[in-house]
Amino acid sequence: MRKSGSMRREKDSLGEIAVPAAAYYGAQTQRAVQNYPISGLRVSPFLVRAAGCVKKAAAQTNGAAGRLPPKVAAAIAEAADDVISLKLLDQFVVDAFQSGAGVSFHMNVNEVVANRAIEILGGRRGDYAVVHPNDQVNLGQSTNDVVPTAMRLAALMLLREAEPVFREAVRALRAKADEFEGVIKAGRTHMMDAVPLTLGQEFGGYASAIERAANAVRESSAHLRALGIGASAVGTGVNTFSGYREEVVRRLRDLTALDLQPAPDLFEATQSLAPFAILSGALKALALECIRVGNDFRLLSSGPVTGLGEIRLPALQPGSSIMPGKVNPVMPEMLAMVGFQVVGNDAAISLAVQAGQLELNVMMPLVAHNLLQSLQILPNAIGAFTTKCVAGVAADAERCRRYAESTPALATILDTVCGYQKAAEIVKRSLAGGKSIRETALELGYVTREQAEKLLSPEALIRPEGKRRAR
């Protein structure tokens, strides 16, 4: 290693290359920076943190087994702590779209940990005689087991942060369902008038849909808890020792407080990225429900004069640069855009997961980038939608009631009195004559006044099974 001005010269298996003198990364990372000026996007900080966890657990395991000198093992573990805490995040400079399997990212990790460990031991960055990125930081490891293990850890840590957000969204929707229990409104199917229900029933349906989808996300994460660390290059565990993988997993369990186990089949764990597709599919389903619910919020709040106007959303910001006083449903709009992105991410992940060959799927960087983005943006969007929209939504009970009392779908209850054909005639006459269903039915003589009083009210339709009625 030679220094020249603000650069230092490092050597790898391809020869010498100039590296910034102050950088903690080294030759292989520098080559990747030059090779992949693709997107300007960097690897997720969550993946960086997770990779630091793997390096610490491996160093401690190798140190305890006498495969690393104690001082070197301790220095690597301390350097890995700096990676885990993201103190060195600016040193992870490889583009998100990079070499297959994430070799460039993995060497970025190895070099940063090595150079920080060298510094801890009193050496100079780039002096790999003190701590070597391949021979010591990466001892008993391969990109092929480190990167998918780090992907699993990062996803599980993000899911742990997301679960309270999902629960709060369900709680907020259920609270509004209780609040709106007595607000009777017209139902709509095919975007046309349908029999009445309560706004509370509608919101209760939203809560149940989000809860079910969020539960599916949580359940899908079980597939990520089996770690392939120790598989090494192809699943045989070459360059590891008996008990290595169990001990690394045990240390990772202690370090992350996650429920982790060694994968039962290291060859399958190396070949297949299907667990990530399963989680991504569940996230897509949750995103689709969020898009649907958000779109209903936009429909129900449309107006304020010419739309449905059954609910009012919190006014968060001016909605037009030209139309004074306009306020838009910005949080449902944001939620939809995030949902679209998650759906697109899932499509990319699906293509990547089927693209593996033989002993390895090299599309890991793409899967990691898209999955971790979905796990970050979807909970953030749901959290913002919950606090800034759901929590403040209000009902226009008077308008809801007016729609419910005037909908021709009230005639549905008359099917059991005068039959479907006569009820349909009542609806046609009502719409043509501008009279209510009640007035028209009485004029035609198809119901008695007593029947009309008993049957032709929204309350008669919202809970025909006899459950608690709306107030």
Image (spheres, grey):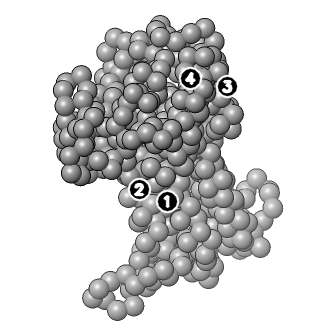
Q: Mark 2 and mark 4: span between their CA atoms? A: 49 Å
Look at mark 2 in the image and give the residue it sits on.
338
In the drawing, does residue 316 fall left or right of residue 222? left
Q: Mark 3 and mark 1: span between their CA atoms? A: 34 Å
* Residue drawn at (37%, 81%) of the image: 319
Q: Are marks 4 and 1 in contact (CB under 8 Å)?
A: no
Q: Mark 3 and mark 2: span between their CA atoms? A: 36 Å
How dense is the environment of label 4, judged by Cα within 10 Å: few (below 14), some, or many (20 and up)?
some
SS under mark 2: helix
- N-term mark: 2 or 4: 4
Q: Mark 3 and mark 4: span between their CA atoms? A: 21 Å
- N-term mark: 3 or 4: 4
Look at mark 3 in the image and give the residue it sits on.
250
* Residue drawn at (53%, 29%) of the image: 72
Look at mark 4 in the image and give the residue it sits on.
69
* Residue drawn at (34%, 11%) of the image: 358
How dense is the environment of label 2, judged by Cα within 10 Å: few (below 14), some, or many (20 and up)?
many
In the drawing, does residue 245 fall left or right of residue 49? right
Q: Are marks 1 and 2 in contact (CB under 8 Å)?
A: yes
Query: What's under tag 4, amino acid-wise?
Result: Pro
Query: What's under tag 3, amino acid-wise?
Result: Arg
